[in-house]
Amino acid sequence: MECHQVLLKSNSYYKNLSEVLKANFQLRTLLFISTTNFSSEPDFLVSKKMKIIISSAFVQITFGLKTDTLNKFNDVFVAPSSYSYKNNTAVFKGDVNIATKKVNMSWPAIEKGFKITDDALNLSIHEFGHCLIFENHTRSYFSKIFNKADFENWKNHAKTKFQKVKAKENIVLRDYAATNLVEFFSVSLETFFEQAVYFKENEPELYESMTQLLKQDPINKKNPIL
Ligand SMILES: [Zn+2]
């Protein structure tokens, strides 16, 4: 019940789902929470509500896939505010550390990501997108997250779009996407979920390749699963 109320209030993707899919979404959210260690600084409590909100991003991305948990990136550190690292002046809102397998995200940025539902900025979706790419890469052939052919197809369309972004002939995706293919995937995910119609209208082939890859089409809000 608590899970439903929190999701209803905080996650617009969930809010639009059919009743049957809502129930499934809740189960997947609770499963993800139970397989993830959430931590923060000693004086900052990561509440159940926060865990539900953060986990809902992962469930949203993987809702059409068999994969419902992560095997390696099971630690989520919730920073009370933006942070920086020793010997580095850059300020982060979130990052995924491949060495420690830790997902770091700042709570204000997480919250903002869900509050503004149509600006194609959602930190949790972005960072979990990185986890999926990294895990898919390291998993054995039989436990891959993405179907190999779907992933290759997506990569081909992504590379074409990548060149457009680099050539400054880009609309739809923010320019940060051109950093590398890993960032491209996460930025695409944010746009896929928050500006689906606009994405499909302007980059139909790339959009289509993402629906195949993720086995869902967010334009069908009530029943996105393909
Ligand atoms: Zn990133």
Image: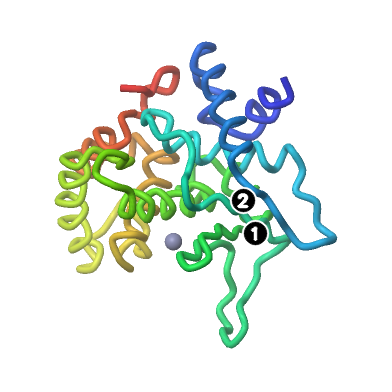
**Discs 1, 2 touching: Cβ within 8 Å:** yes
Indicate left or right for 91 with 223 as reference: right
Residue 216 on image: x %, y %: 34, 28
At 54% from the left and 19% from the top, the residue drawn is 22
Determine the residue positioned at 56% across, 17% down: 23
Residue 162, position in %: x, y? 22, 60
Q: Quadrant of residue 87?
A: bottom right
Residue type beneath disc 2: Ile
Does the image show residue 51? yes
Residue lying farthest top? 20
Instruction: Name the secondary structure under disc 1.
Output: strand
Mark number displayed over residue 110 = 2
Q: Is residue 48 left or right of residue 162?
A: right
Question: Which of the two residues, 45 or 208, is positioned nearer the viewer here?
Answer: 45
Residue lying farthest bottom? 87
Q: Which residue is mark 1?
A: 106
Question: Where residue 89 appears, x then y in whole percent?
Answer: 58, 84
Can you name the residue that lies furthest to the right here? 43
Q: Quadrant of the N terminus?
A: top right
Disc 2 residue crowd, few under 14, some 14–19, many 20+, Cα 10 Å: many
Can see residue 199?
A: no
Pick whichever, 109 or 135, lies toward us: 135
Residue 205 lies left or right of residue 106; in this view the side is: left
Picture coordinates of residue 41, whole percent (x, y): 77, 62
Q: Quadrant of the C terminus?
A: top left
Mark on residue 69? Answer: none
